[in-house]
């Protein structure tokens, strides 16, 4: 929905080459460098570092030496098939190119009843004290009657102006909130944005007692917190648990890891083996690979596995392995390693975190034996892998029951109870546990 400007690499008057980085932006998932699609001179920039810019807004103008008048072109992250606002060409006589922020096509929605609300709309409603009851009564001007940012801001403005009656559309009493941005040629909701901003500025500072340290959340942590709250508001979470004997899998990996690395030049961890087992079970129970759209269940044919990855900062990001069901173990291993390394080195691209259909998180990597993860919207389930522990367990042998030391792991899955009932959730989870337990210890690489 929006992007934050992190750093300008160019300022007004600076020359810029084709594909040279103009600035860095931060979206809700990753930081990206924005390159220029033309060669020219940076004529003007319209925003400062740390400004939050709506998608599609013009942020800079590049003067080119082309003789033919060129229409504005866009520069930005991949997946630019959808724009929040259509840019308006400049009226100057010289040839110009427009640099604008863009969005990818994987927009996230939050559903309540039969209506959809984007995280941005919900955040504005929460910060302005707009209840869900009020929100449900706001007429939406978006697709299929959805409430847009403009709708909620208009309602907030009307409410503060004393016009709280929903649906009041009398032109003679409606305040003018749209102003013209003469620099960019755009219409902006300046008055409403200022109203929303001023509310936060007027709040009295909180006083903390005792010996405390105040740590400001960084941008990513704020976004993670927002997504987690939105997920809980969207999906009724249920978590089921199962236990799996992964002894054969652990011994096999220990036996072949050196040969695998020598042959493939890749270190093999347990993660690609876990993903392989999950993919097999998703094929048996496809509803786990779905999302909800109103009262329709959208079952995804592509199996794109997100793997939660911890960053050095302590934050979390979920890169996605696309079409995981089409990859063999070597392919999965390379994808896991590449995405994990890119995440740790801040090299992920926007497309690397888009399109996930099912997520796996390894809570055991930090010593937890089990977890109750929060669903990664708009997916309907997330699987947590606990720490693998050696324990004495009862096993069945040809000679009868006996006690043996086995590698045991607790796996858990949180799922959207609107879609997945306990029977299906438990069946799928136990299928994953059995898939891991029945791993072929004599398998060839």
Image (cartoon, rainbow, N blue to C red):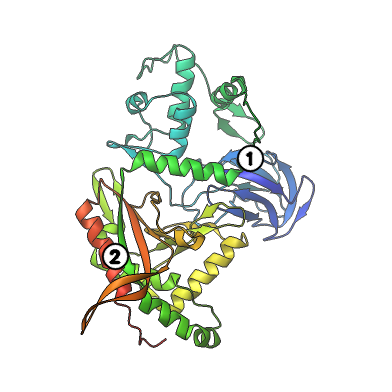
Q: Nearer the viewer, mark 2 or mark 1?
A: 2
Identify the residue under disc 2: 282
Q: Is residue 116 above or below residue 311?
A: above
What residue appears at the point 31 percent right and 74 percent down from the top-left corner? 437
What residue appears at the point 56 percent right and 55 percent down from the top-left corner? 77
Which of the labelled discs sits on residue 295, or is there none? none
Q: Position of residue 15 (x, y in %)?
A: 78, 54
The residue positioned farthest toward the right in the image shown: 13
256 displayed left or right of 433: right
Q: Position of residue 251 (x, y in %)?
A: 42, 80
314 displayed left or right of 423: right
The quadrant holding residue 247 is bottom left
Q: Position of residue 33 (x, y in %)?
A: 64, 55
Identify the residue under disc 1: 90
Q: Is residue 104 above or below residue 157?
A: below
Does dot 2 land on a helix, a strand or a loop? helix
Q: Residues within 10 Å of mark 2 (few under 14, many from 20)?
A: some
- Name the quadrant of the C terminus: bottom left
What residue appears at the point 37 percent right and 66 percent down from the top-left corner? 409
Closer to the camera, 249 or 226? 249
Closer to the camera, 416 or 347? 416
What residue appears at the point 50 percent right and 85 percent down from the top-left corner? 260
């Amino acid at each position: 929905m929006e992007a934050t400007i992190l750093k300008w690499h160019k300022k007004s008057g600076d020359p810029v080459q084709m594909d040279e980085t103009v600035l860095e932006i931060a979206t809700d998932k990753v930081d990206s460098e924005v390159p220029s699609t033309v060669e020219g001179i940076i004529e003007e920039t319209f925003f400062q570092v740390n400004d939050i810019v709506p998608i599609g807004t013009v942020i800079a103008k590049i003067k080119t030496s082309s003789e033919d008048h060129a229409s504005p072109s866009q520069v930005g992250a991949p997946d630019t098939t959808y724009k929040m606002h259509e840019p308006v060409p400049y009226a100057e006589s010289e040839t110009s190119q427009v640099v604008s922020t863009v969005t990818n096509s994987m927009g996230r929605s939050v559903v309540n009843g039969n209506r959809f609300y984007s995280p941005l709309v919900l955040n504005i409603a929460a910060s302005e004290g707009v209840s869900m009851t009020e929100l449900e009564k706001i007429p939406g001007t978006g697709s299929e009657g959805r409430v847009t940012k403009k709708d909620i801001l208009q309602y907030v403005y009307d409410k503060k102006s004393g016009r709280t009656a929903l649906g009041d559309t009398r032109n003679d009493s409606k305040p003018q909130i749209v102003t013209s941005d003469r620099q960019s040629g755009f219409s902006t909701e300046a008055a409403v944005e200022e109203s929303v901003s001023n509310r936060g500025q007027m709040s009295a500072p909180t006083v903390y007692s005792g010996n405390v340290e105040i740590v400001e959340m960084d941008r990513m942590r704020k976004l993670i917190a927002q997504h987690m709250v939105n997920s809980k508001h969207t999906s009724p979470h249920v978590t089921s648990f199962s236990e799996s004997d992964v002894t054969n899998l652990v011994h096999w990996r220990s036996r072949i890891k050196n040969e695998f690395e020598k042959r493939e030049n890749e270190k093999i961890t347990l993660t690609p083996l876990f993903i392989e087992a999950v993919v097999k079970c998703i094929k048996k129970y496809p509803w786990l690979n779905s999302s909800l759209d109103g009262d329709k269940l959208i079952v995804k044919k592509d199996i794109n596995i997100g793997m939660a990855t911890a960053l050095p900062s302590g934050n979390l990001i979920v890169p996605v392995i696309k079409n995981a069901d089409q990859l063999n173990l070597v392919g999965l291993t390379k994808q896991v390693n590449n995405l994990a390394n890119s995440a740790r080195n801040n090299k992920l691209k926007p497309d690397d975190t888009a399109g996930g259909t099912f997520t796996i998180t390894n809570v055991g990597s930090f010593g937890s034996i089990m977890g109750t993860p929060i669903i990664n919207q708009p997916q309907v389930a997330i699987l947590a892998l606990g720490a693998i522990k050696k324990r004495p367990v009862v096993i069945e042998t040809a000679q009868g029951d006996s006690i043996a030391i086995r590698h045991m792991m607790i796996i858990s899955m949180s799922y959207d109870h609107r879609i997945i009932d306990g029977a299906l959730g438990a069946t799928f989870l136990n299928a994953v546990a059995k898939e891991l337990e029945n791993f072929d210890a004599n398998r060839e690489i």
